[in-house]
Image (cartoon, helix red, strand yellow):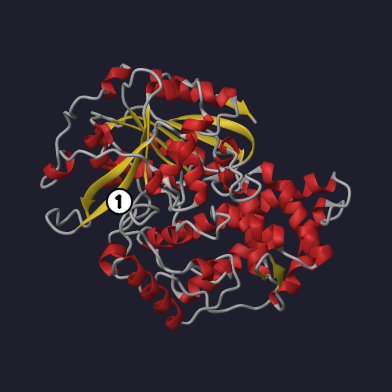
Amino acid sequence: MASLAARQAHSHPGNVNTSRLLLLMLTATLTACGTGTSTTSTPSGLGRFHSQQIAWEPCGGYATTSIETAVFDRATTAQCGYLEVPLDYREPHGDTVRLAVMRVPAVGEAVGSLVINPGGPGGSGLFAAAATALSLPGSRVTDRFDLVGFDTRGVGASEPAVDCFTDAEADRGDIVLTTQGTTVQWTAEDTRHVFERCAQGSGGADVLAGLGTRNTARDMDVLRAVLGDERLTFLGQSYGTRLGAVYAEQFPRNVRAMVLDGAIDPSQRTFERRVGAFSGFQRSFEQMAAFCATRPGCPLGTDPAAATDRFHEIVRPLYAAAIPALDSELDFDGAVGGVISGLYSEAAWPRVIAGIAQVQQQGRGDELRQLGYDFALRDAEGNWTNFTEALYATNCMDEERLSERDGNTLRARIFEAAPFMDPGVVLTGARDGCEHWPAEPTLGFPYATDIDGLPPTLVVSITGDPTTPHAGGIRLAQTLGSALLTVEGEGHTIVTAGTNQCVNDIAADYLVDLVLPDEGATCRL
């Protein structure tokens, strides 16, 4: 469910093309979201959290990589600070956590906040706020709203952050947090070891048990109150659409407007949704292969129907013997992961093709490894964000737990849905990486159903989305009673990119004026 589609669109770490990065990631009157004190009721025991003030300061110390530093520095008006929230909302007088928050003030008269979540879970809201400000210059959105992003529990600059592996282990490809869509074969001891590493590095088992979308939605309502917004104006992408839907379920009357871009179907259970997501990657692989077939020297050949077989010929040998890649090695899972990183954005397809050709012709995996690095926003100095670890830990508190038998069945179904990922060997040991987690998941499926009091919202869905299929956008719009903007083309999320005027205008009209598009509205990439 990773958004941030353009994470892989900048050519190398340190070379930050903001608008491409956010192809990766990003009636009441407008004064109804004004800067006065919220008039909504404060939940019991949360008064001190709702009444706190964020101590705003420059954002330099909030970056976790040099890529983030470069973007933060360019967002010259950005301010950062910390928001304190309960670790456990059932015990508001107990331990707390600190969430890093960025605010980029409106260019014009500030009339409210637009809270942005870029997806993941695990994407940095600070990065999303800064990059959106840079990719939407002159927009009515940046003119009328303070852009606000926060690193959700366990993410980025928030404290404590989820930390399960070292940067050196990440460079070696040793961050293994799931068996699904991989060749990983785990024992119960392996999954226990992963949990223990995460608990040790992240502040303990209680911190891990406090993660999950329901608590993040509660955190976002505290943020809304502290920002002084009577009602929330929200832009969520990819996983951010789940966060938005859960917030709408829990606080429907605290919503002013929501744009949900790259939608997750709230009715799908874990097994079904994961199969559907990987089928989307197969479709995008085939689209990429068709594009490749039109170019000279395509490593996948001139027949797109045979591209999966050609890909197997090139990468399946890596299951038995990894090849050199930058300062490390590339195995089969690493090659598939690099390809998937590039399937999020059509702009990255030439890099995917070049990476496959490099494996075929040179026996090296530099470009595919770099694609994986770029998706994770690893910088040139070797610093990684904690995106992957935070995604894993948050999902442990959201997704249904599977038995080993069901896990093996799911892996087989994934390879059927996305045969380009199939290593061609018999695998077992598809254990759930969350099986030793200290608490049961709290999300529940389906979610966000039968909501009363929710104002009109807007769902944006790309027909060729590789990981949140268009059908999920239709379903989310039906569930929330939202207007649906269909965007014809390839890619994952579009609203924060600033590259499509049709999308820009419709999103701005809704966010600023609360004017929804007509039924059947369509834009084209």
Left/right of residue 459 with respect to residue 277 in the rendered view = left
For image coordinates 64% across by 50% down, the residue present is 12
- Of 475 and 387, nearer the camera is 387
Seen in the picture, residue 348 relative to 315 is either above or below; the reply is: above
Left or right of 204? Residue 236 is: right
Identify whether 397 is placed above or below 513: below
Q: How many marks?
A: 1
Residue drawn at the location 67% of the way across and 56% of the way down: 339
Quarter-of-image position of residue 390: bottom left
Give the secondary structure at mark 1: helix
Is residue 417 in sight in this rendering? no
**Residue 446 image offset from top left, x and y in percent:** 38, 51
**Position of residue 218 measured from the top left corner of the image (x, y, whole percent):** 26, 46
Q: Which amino acid does label 1 sit on?
A: Arg
Q: In which quarter of the image is the C terminus?
A: top right
Percent coordinates x, y for residue 143 in the rendering? 42, 21
Vertical relation: 437 (above or below) 455? below
Near-viewer residue (408 or 321): 321
Hey, which quadrant is residue 445 in on the image? bottom left
What residue sits right under mark 1 in the picture? 214
Give neighbour class at mark 1: few <14, some 14-19, many 20+ (Cα, 10 Å): many
Q: Which of 161 and 12 is in front in this view?
A: 12
Residue 193 can be seen in this image: yes
Q: Where is residue 496 in the image (x, y as percent from the top left)?
A: 51, 33
